[in-house]
Structure formats: structure tokens, C-alpha cells
Amino acid sequence: MFLCWCLSLVALIPLTTSTNPGVKVKLTAKGIEYGRQLAVASILQKLKTIKLDDMSGKVKVSPIGNVKYSLTKKDSGSFNLNANDISFSTSLSIKSDQTGRPVVNSLDCGANVGKMSVHFKGGASWLYNLFSKYIDSAIRKAMQKQICPLVANAVSDLNNNLKTLNVLAKVDKFAEIEYSMVASPAVSKTSIDFGLKGEFYNIGNFSLPPQVNNMLYIGVSSFTTESAAFVYNTAGALSLYITDDMIPQGSPIRLNTRTFGLFIPQVAKRFPGLMMKLLVKTVKTPFITFEPNNATVQTFASVTAYAIQPNATLTPLFVLNLDSSVSARVFVSGTRLAGAVTLNKMDLTLGTSYVGDFQVSSLDSIFQMVLKMVVIPRMNVQLAKGYPLPTLGKMKLVNTQLLVLKDYVMIGTDVQFTG
């Protein structure tokens, strides 16, 4: 099947957009050699299909002198043709097509037939054999011209096979996985490495309602937003250090051991007069739900409180589990899908304490303030930047409407092209 394994992968031109692969495939030297053997056998079969056109020429034959010859379909009989030392080479580029499947293109090709001999039988073979060495040369050149087209044909056969690659494979009734290429393969002396997307998708059967008032309708499923949350959470981007200078100046609550000592006396006793720092970070991917006219995000985070020593060393005081629910307002900004959140409720539990037992509920008011005045405003700054919707060229969205429906958001819009 993989006919191009026999071809020299001299040049692979990177023509795809690179991103981190979820699945990697390595084709080793052993695998390449096996493919080469399969391909050589296929090419040899193709060589048997070569047809020689009529040919003629003029040669000097001693002692006769100049002789004109012509090989056509006349006469009868047969001949034995023996070709040795046939070689060819080609350079290939591999890129991804619009479906994410690899496509191979031949950049150049060179072919050579080292030795050729022909022996005629029957008819006027005694005469033809007198000129066989000259005919050998003509046939050899004619065959060389046909080898590279056969190689191109083999590459075409390969692409037909590559079209069967299951870039979107169904796992079960709930999920499918995408195996599209994310970059051109990396070629070394011993292997070829492929990077595939390897991303799971929900086989949701949501379909857009039959509205026709706008020019264009776009549906964005909750899975899409959850996959974004997964990416940012995995990258560690959903974390924030909070210091006192981030608290509004008019707030009576400060991030220092004096304020926290009012609720946890041992903090003020053991670490008097020190400023504090909080680290808020998600511990698992936020869970997003879309219901009619309602979008909700469940977050699961930890809060680590530190006392800042005079030498800037951070001393951990306690770790809290912070589970919260926020309502999300989703809207279109330009050609991007944006949002803003507001706090619904939160739940604090003690994870670890380095200062002894204390009543976690006494800290509710502090962390309500921290979420509302620091964390959520910063989240909204990022969400307001939005995430790009599928657009074409200098397309502008106008008369845009957005509805939150069961498991997805529907955007109805007209479009204008500028420039």
C-alpha cells in the first residue's frame, strides 16, 4: 500500500500549521525497508506494462557504412529483452490536505537503465540481430523516459490509499477521535515521525434550528468550550497569585496576617505583622453547561495562603478547597465569541492547615470579596478578548443575535465584506 516508501525522501517541505500533537507515530528503518520491498515489487510490475513506440535512426556500421533503421509493427516473430541495473530517485514533499490527511507530491525524478540487450527470433531476426547493439541503446533511452511517469503513477496510487486514512474515527456512540496531521513529518536517517491531533470529540447530534432570517448561522457546542477549558487548565493558565496591592484601596480587608488573625488567631500570633499572598488555581477542568437562556460554569480550585517573610520567603499557612458556580453571559464581539461571568455561589472546605484547626466558614466573607473584586474581574478581561469564529477574508458580522440553547450556543448574523 505505502508505495512511496521505496522513494528517496530527500526533501520534505513543511507546509502545514504546527501544533502540539496528541498522538505520535514513528515509522522506523525496519518499517521503511518493508515498504520499500513492497513498492519495488509494485514498480517492477508496472515496468512490464511499458510499451515501446515505433523508433528509427541512423548508425554507422562497419564495413557497410551508414545504415538507416526503423522498428515498426511490420514483420513477425518475437524478441527477448533483458534490462539490468535499473535505478531511479525522487524527492518528495508531504503536506496535509483540507481533511488533515497526508498528501505526497513528487518534486523531481531521475531514472537510469544501466544495461540493455535484445535478441530477435523468427522472421528477419538474422538481420535485426546484426544491429542489436544499436537497437539496445535506442530501447534503453526509450525505457528511461517512461520510468519517471511510472513513479509519478505510483505516488498517485499512494495518495489514493492515503485518502482512506481514518482522520475521524468513531470510538463508540459517545465519542470520536480525530487523527489529522498537525505538522509535516520529521525525517531523520533512521525514522519518519508523524504528529497527529489525537483529540476526542463528543458525537453530539445537535442541529441548528431552521431559521432563515439571517445570512449565516453558527452553532458552538458546550464541548467546544469545555475543550478550551481543558487546554488552558492543562497549560496551567488558570491560576493567579493575589497580593494586597490587587485589593481595592477602600476595602477594610487586607491581605496580611493582622486581618486573617481576626478569623484565625494563631496566624497573627505566629506570623505577626507580615503581608500575605494567595495562590488560586484550578485543580481540574471547569465544567460548562448550556441550558436555554442560561450558561453556567462550575469551577474546582484550591487556594493556598502564604505569609511573606522579610526575606521574601513564602511560608504556607493553609490550603482551602474552593468550589464555585458562576453564570456566564455569552456575546459576539466583532468576529469573536466573548463572555463575562458573575459569581453565583461558592463553597469552602479545609484541605490542609499548617497553623492548626480553624473554622473555615469564618473566611467566607474574605473569599467572597477576593473572588468578586479580584479573580472574576481578571477573568472577564480575558473573556472579553474573545475567541475567533470561523470567518472568511475581511468579513464583518452585522445584525448579530445570540441564543443560548440546550448544549450549544447559536449565532445568527448577516455578513458584509470590506476591502
Image: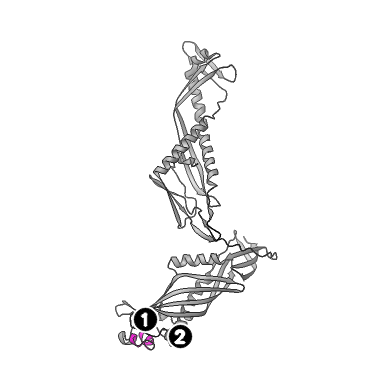
The amino acid sitting under disc 2 is: Ser
Number of on-image labels: 2
- In the orientation shown, which residue stands out farthest toward the right? 213
Q: Tell me if residue 135 comes above or below residue 244 in the rendering.
A: above
Residue 85 at what x, y percent from top left? 43, 29
Residue at x 40% of width, y 81% of height: 244
Residue 403 at what x, y percent from top left? 63, 70
Is residue 262 rendered magenta in the image? yes
Q: Tell me if residue 336 comes above or below residue 185 in the rendering.
A: below
- Pointer 1 local density, CA inside 10 Å: few below 14, some 14–19, many at least 20: many
- Pointer 2 local density, CA inside 10 Å: few below 14, some 14–19, many at least 20: few
Colour scheme employed for the rendering of this structure: one colour
Residue that mark 1 sits on: 276
Q: Give the range drawn in magenta.
A: 253-267
Residue that mark 2 sits on: 365
Q: Give the quarter of the image for residue 307.
A: bottom left
Report if residue 7 is visible in the image: no
Report if residue 4 is visible in the image: yes
Residue at x 58% of width, y 17% of height: 76
The amino acid sitting under disc 1 is: Met
Is residue 127 rendered magenta in the image? no
Residue at x 49% of width, y 23% of height: 81
